[in-house]
Amino acid sequence: MSASPSTLRAAPDGGLLAAAGILAALGLLMVYSSTAPLHLGRAIPPHFLRQLGAVALGVAVAGIAMRVPLAAWRRLARPLWLVSLLLLVVTLVAGVRVNGARRWLALGGFSFQPGELAKLATLLLMAAMLADRPHGRRSPRELLPVLAVAALPALLLLPQPDTGNAVLLLVLAGLLLFVAGTPLHLLVAPALLGAGALVGALVLRPYAWARLRGFWDPWATANAEGFQIVQSFVAFGRGGALGVGLGDGRQKLFYLPEAHTDFVLSVVAEELGLVGVALVLGAFAAVWLAGCRIAFRARDRFALLTAFAMTTLLAIPAALNAAVAMGLVPPKGLALPFLSYGRSSLLVCFAALGLLLGIGCREAAPKARRVARAEPRRSWRS
C-alpha cells in the first residue's frame, strides 16, 4: 500500500534541525540582550516577548510547511506570488513609514513586511517554471517569463526603498537559474541590466552614495556615513576571542545603530567573542550543507530546485549580513535569518525551513537511484 502524499517517509534532517534550533535560541538571547537597554523599567523587554511569540508561531509554520505535499506547494506557487505582488503594491500606497522607508503593512495591530514573503514566493514560482523543462531554458525568449517573475517584485521593492532586498532577490534568482542549467551567456545581459538599474538607484539617492563613501573609508567619516561600520568594528574588537560576557556589551547602549536587527552579529561578537561568531557562522554552514544534501537526494527536478532555493534563502542573506557587520560590503539593511529581531523575516525563515525538511523527509531518493540519475542531472547543463 503506497503512502499518502502527506506521509513523511523519513525522519527530519537532524543536522538541519539542530542548526536552526541553535540559531533561533541564540537569536532570542541576543534580542533580549540588545533590547533590554531600550526598556530599563521593565524586567522583560517587549521586543523579546514579540520575538518569542514569533518563534513559537514559526515552529508551527515550519511544521505545517513540512507536512504540506510538495505537489501542493507547486500548485500554490503562482497564487502565492500574485498575492505577494499585490501586497507590495498596497505597501507602496498605504504602507507604514518607518525611518523614511515604506516597507510594512499594519493589520489589526500586527505589522509585517511583504518583501519577505515576496522572496519566498518568487523563488518557489521560479522553481516550478524551471522544473517544467528538464533541459533548462535554451533561448532568451524562453528565459524572459522566468526573469519577469523575479524582476517584477524587485522593481516594486526599489521605491519603498528596499534596495538591499531587491538586490538580494535578484542574486537568489540568478543562482537558481544557474543551478537549473541556464547557460551563462544568457545570464550576462540580465546581470548587466540589473547592475545598471542598481547604479541608477544609487545616482538618484544621495543617501546611498553617502553609505558607499562610508564603506570605502569608514574611519574618515566615523561621525557620519561610516558611523555604523566603525561601531561594528569596535564591537568586534572589544569581544576578542571569548567576549565580554552575555549582556555586558557596551556598543548596544545607543552606539551601534540597529543593534537588534541589522547588526545583531556585532552584538554577538562583542558579548560572545570569536567563539560566538564561529558558532553562528558554523550553524549557517551546517544549514547550507544540509540543504545541499537534501537537494542532491531529491527525487525530481522541482524538489531539487525548491530545496536549493530555500537553502539559499536562509544561507545567502546570512553571508551578506555577516559581510556587512565585518565591513566587507556596504550596509544594506538585511536581517540575519533567525537571529535579527523581526517577525516577518522569522516566519519566512521557518517556512523555508519547513519546506526543506519536508523535501528531505518525503522526496529523498534511495542511494542506488541517485547514482542512476547522476548522468541525466549533468546533462541539464549540456
Image (cartoon, rainbow, N blue to C red):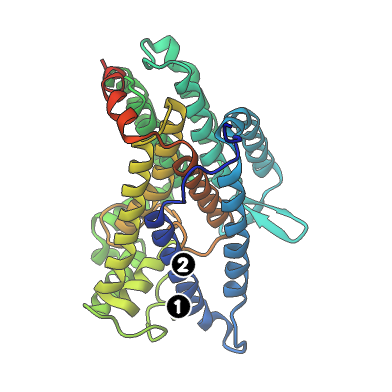
- In this view, 313 is above or below 183: below
Image position of 295 (left or right of 353): left
**Residue 198 can be seen in this image:** no
Which residue: 48% across, 18% down?
132
* Relative image position of residue 177 (x, y in whole percent): 37, 27
Which residue: 29% across, 24% down?
372
* Relative image position of residue 300 (x, y in whole percent): 43, 27
Quarter of the rendering containing residue 5 = top right
**Residue 23 or 229: which is nearer the viewer?**
23
- Label disc, if present, on residue 254 of the rendered structure: 1
Which residue: 71% across, 46% down?
94
Image position of 328 (left or right of 91): left
| SS at circle 1 | loop
- In this view, 179 is above or below 240: above
- Label disc, if present, on residue 36 of the rendered structure: none
Residue lying farthest right?
108
For the residues labelled 2 and 1, the Cα–Cα distance comes to: 9 Å
For the image, the number of numbered tags is 2
* Relative image position of residue 32 (x, y in whole percent): 51, 77
Q: Tag 1: Cα neighbours inside 10 Å, few (<14), some, or many (≥20)? A: few
Quarter of the rendering containing residue 347 = bottom right
- Label disc, if present, on residue 258 of the rendered structure: 2
| SS at circle 2 | loop
Q: Amino acid at mark 1?
A: Phe
From the image, which quarter does the C terminus lie in?
A: top left
Q: Amino acid at mark 2?
A: Glu
